[in-house]
Amino acid sequence: MLEVKNLTFKVNENGVERSIVKDISFSMENGEMLVITGPNGGGKSTLAKVLMGIEKADAGQILLDGADISDFDIDHRAKAGIGFAFQQPPRFKGMTVDRLLGLAAGEHLPEQEACRMLSAVGLCAKEYLKREIDGTLSGGEMKRLEIATVLAKPHKLCIFDEPEAGIDLWSFSMLIQQFERIHRKKDQMLMLISHQERIIRMADRIMVIDDGKIKHIGPREEILPALLTDEPSCTCMDREQ
Amino acid sequence: MAELLDQITEQVLRQIDSSAGFKQEGAFNLRQNGISLCHGNTEHIKIKKKEDKQGIDVYIDGDTKGEEVHIPVVVSASGMVDIVYNDFYIADGADVTIVAGCGIHNSGCNESRHDGIHAFHVGKGANVRYEEKHYGEGEGTGARVLNPVTKIYMEDDAVFTLDTVQIKGVDSTVRETEVTMGAGAKLYVVEKLMTHDSQTAESNMAVYMQGEDSSAQIISRSVAKGQSTQIFHPRAIGEAKCHAHIQCDSIIMDEARVRSIPEIDARHLDAAIIHEAAIGRINNEQLIKLRTFGMTEEEAENVIVEAFLN
């Protein structure tokens, strides 16, 4: 279970303090899928980074299965059971795909296992294993590999920041199936930041964040109809892939 | 009968020749502290000791297909200066891999130095892969110095892959490389280097593309740690219709200094030569990504450096 209490994150811009995440509180049950959506610049990605420890909260508390991880740094949060897929994953000169997957899994992976992980995100497996993670991989390939690194081992909480961005329709369908498969097992909490209607429709609950605050949070059936109307807070959402 | 090797030599050979240990099989020549300790020939590869100076001549005939020649050098005597001249004559159409590591174990307070001066005469259509690993170790305060000079003469349609790695522990190195290329010849260079503490490394390379349709790809990757300094000066000189690409990437850490000076020199209207050079610290996004796998910052740094020099 994830409990987030009064989380606040501020930045200092030219001597002026500005709140990006404003006193946010919510919780997630084990096995739940929460989709966070809302206007660009509303604080969704920053909230995710604060949860992973990439950004340090100015106030608030984060509990994972009852343990206070608020003061944990990134690697300790990872060891506590949080996985994170970046919106724009970094490239690594000299690093091969199978090496990165092995590092993500925390062990050397047999070729067949690495292939299976790549296939799950729509990468045609074996030919990719020895590819270098540099400029020769396309943005879409990088994104799918990024998702595979999070799926490489089980976590208590998996955070995906806009997993759909840059992915073609065919791979996107495979990705949706993969998320559904994980969700059906109900053994990991899935937090997806997304503007994509197909992803939003998978959610158990939807959270709408705007201007650093939770504008709405509730079951999909309750929140989705409002999102699909012309409600002002949701007009920026992309309803098409 | 195989020569018995001492523990230090075995240990250094595992670093510079093969992690499984050096094998006295096939074509080989092991030089230790200025003496050729043992050597072997094969049907297609003959190694002869020079009579006028230190070194060997290696003759690789045209029927050589996929064979390896191992010519490691170990210097374990503190204060030793070992200068050796090795010449390789590779016949037309041969296909060979030459492994020529050099390791210095210095447990004393005097400088130990090895200058390997190599010349490769590569026949028409021959395919040569040359691997050179440099390594230093030892608890002594004496410097470990390696100054290789490599000259490569490529005839038409020859292919030469030069793969050099300076692993660690070399206090000072000045590397001089010169290549001349005939028509249709192809050169691939991968140079990997790591310096630490107060080490210095300088690499100067000149590639003369004299034959039509010759091409060269030069990739240099380095990591400079501590107070070490590195200078790279690769030059691609196009004297005919040719193509070349130079790429120098360096990671700089701590208080190190890296100078990268790629030079492209076109002397023909159809010479197409490109260079790229980048020096920067370890990318913070890479560090964060690896830390989300549960690695500490130090572990993540080591993985990034190891992969970069892989």
Image: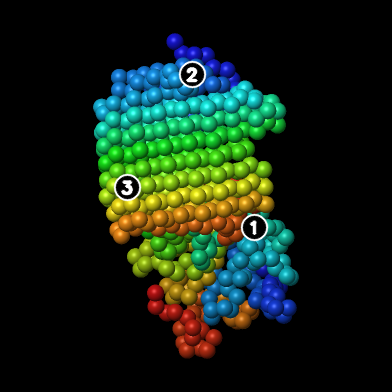
Which of the marked residues, 3 or 2, is nearer the chain's N terminus? 2
Q: At which x and y percent is residue B240?
A: 30, 52
Q: Amino acid at mark 1?
A: Ile
Report the residue at 55% width, 26% height from top: B82
Q: At which x and y percent is residue B310?
A: 49, 44
- In the rendered image, the quadrant that contains the N terminus of chain B is top left
Q: Is residue A214 left or right of residue B262?
A: right
| Nearest to viewer (mark 3 / mark 1) | 3
Mark 3, chain letter?
A: B
A16 over B91 or under it: above or below: below
Q: Is residue A66 left or right of residue A97?
A: right
Secondary structure at badge 2 equals strand
| Same-subunit check for callouts 3 and 2 | yes
Mark 1, chain letter?
A: A
Mark 2, chain letter?
A: B
| Same-subunit check for callouts 1 and 2 | no
Which residue occupies the extreme top position in the image? B1
Mark identifier at residue B210: 3
B112 over A33 or under it: above or below: above
Tell me the crowding category of disc 2: few under 14, some 14 to 19, or many 20 or more residues within 10 angstroms, Cα based: some
Tell me which corner region of the image, top left, top right, bottom left or bottom right, holds residue B40: top left
Report the residue at 60% width, 38% height from top: B172
Mark identifier at residue B36: 2
Q: As rendered, which of A224 and A175 lies closer to the eye?
A: A175
Report the residue at 34% width, 65% height from top: A170
Q: Which residue is mark 1?
A: A74
Q: At which x and y percent is residue B187?
A: 36, 44
